[in-house]
Image (cartoon, coloured by chain):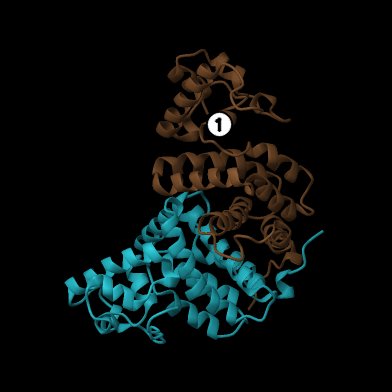
Chain colours: A cyan, B brown
């Protein structure tokens, strides 16, 4: 990655509380420029400096509003939540019970009416726009997959993280988009014990999770 | 369902080999009318008779070209394959190894370049059109879920079938649409042993598949 390394956000992000609290125009200009830069260059090659240049502002001003490239992306794409913020706690507690924690993270992020719409919009844009798919792909790879995979001690950690993510993305498609019953209306507490062992097995290869293929 | 019960297709469908071999105009009119009827009434309430009426042809002519409402829908929606045709063999062999067979069915249906595009188009239309989502939902419920669920002996069979389908749909989204590596390029033979135990556990509740949630 070129340009100054964005600061990594560790704790909650007070800047993000209440969307665009002040400097509405400047933030709007940064976000609009960011959308163009991400669409043109992808997530990987985009830099805070490049976004600042496109917005016609000083990079320090961008850093004033956003702690990282991830934060700009999350606002530009209208993500329901900052991924690292919810993923870090689930990962940092170790692999014991990580499957259930990750399932709960997913549902906490997108099982509200407003979040559902954003998830649908995000998936829809990836379906219909190769540019959007590329941005999402690079963002997921850099900000999510690498972090979760690094916390695991299994072979092919990235592939396993993606299969776990695929399970939950598929649940989102069937539950929120196509809305097939009974999954569309099943309470989260009914789904957690069914889904948790799946993610546990992918993420840890736990033999109790049945990591041997049946005949 | 009103109207004459469509014949169920058991074996391969010679009619469908080579798309629209003859009677191009008539078949085209039937398919066009079917798209309108399915979009207006949904899959459940649509009938062969109603489609014939909308196309301005005799219902017997529709039956001449299509053995069932399912077949018309599959052609109208440009499905890559007739679902019951590939699902039946996987289910009829019993629950032993059904997870692996179902994983292989999914990949056989959509892991070619041309099929991928159709799957993406289908998912994309469901994302962006509530009508398309409804058609797909009703079709999946009636033609796929009921059949697979009936073959299983577990509690909540429909929910489990949907979780299995969600896993594979999510794989399709990550692999074909968002194209996150390494899942995008992983050979099917690497994915089958990872995915088969997941589907096996959902479909049979097999304790060897780890049906107990980890702490």
- Residue nearest the observer in this picture, A197 or A127: A127
Is A175 drawn above or below residue B180 in the view shown? Answer: above
Is A113 drawn above or below residue A95 in the view shown? Answer: above
| Residue count near mark 1 (Cα–Cα under 10 Å), binned few <14, some 14–19, many ≥20 | many
Q: Which residue is mark 1?
A: B75
**Residue B5 at x, y = what percent?**
59, 24
Q: Is residue B178 something one can see in this rendering?
A: yes
- Residue nearest the observer in this picture, B187 or A213: B187
Q: Chain of mark 1?
A: B
User: For this view, does A128 lie left or right of residue A208?
Assistant: left
Q: Quadrant of residue A212?
A: bottom right
Quadrant occupied by the N terminus of chain A? bottom left
Quadrant occupied by the C terminus of chain A? bottom right
Q: Quadrant of residue A91?
A: bottom right
Number of marks: 1
**Residue B201 at x, y = what percent?**
70, 61
- Residue nearest the observer in this picture, B175 or A12: B175
**Residue A39 at x, y = what percent?**
37, 62
SS at circle 1 = helix
Q: Is residue A185 something one can see in this rendering?
A: no
**Residue A5 at x, y = what percent?**
40, 84
The residue positioned 49% from the left and 74% from the top of the image is A142
User: For this view, does B147 lie left or right of residue B41?
Assistant: right
């Amino acid at each position: 990655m070129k340009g100054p390394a964005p600061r990594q956000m560790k704790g909650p992000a007070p800047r993000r509380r209440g969307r665009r609290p002040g400097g509405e125009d400047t933030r709007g200009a940064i976000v609009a420029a960011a959308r163009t830069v991400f669409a043109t260059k992808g997530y990987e090659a985009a830099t805070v400096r490049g976004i600042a240049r496109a917005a016609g502002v000083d990079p320090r001003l961008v850093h004033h509003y956003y702690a990282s490239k991830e934060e700009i992306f999350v606002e530009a794409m209208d993500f329901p939540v900052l991924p690292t913020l919810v993923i870090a706690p689930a990962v940092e507690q170790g692999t014991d019970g990580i499957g259930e924690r990750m399932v709960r993270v997913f549902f906490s992020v997108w099982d509200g009416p407003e979040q559902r719409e954003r998830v649908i919009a995000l998936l829809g844009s990836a379906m219909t726009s190769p540019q959007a798919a590329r941005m999402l792909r690079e963002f997921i790879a850099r900000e999510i997959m690498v972090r979760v995979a690094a916390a695991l001690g299994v072979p092919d950690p990235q592939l396993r993280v993606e299969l776990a993510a695929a399970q939950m993305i598929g649940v989102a498609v069937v539950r929120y988009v196509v809305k097939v019953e009974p999954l569309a209306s099943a309470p989260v507490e009914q789904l957690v014990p069914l889904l948790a062992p799946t993610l546990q097995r992918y993420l840890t290869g736990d033999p109790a999770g049945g990591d041997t293929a049946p005949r």
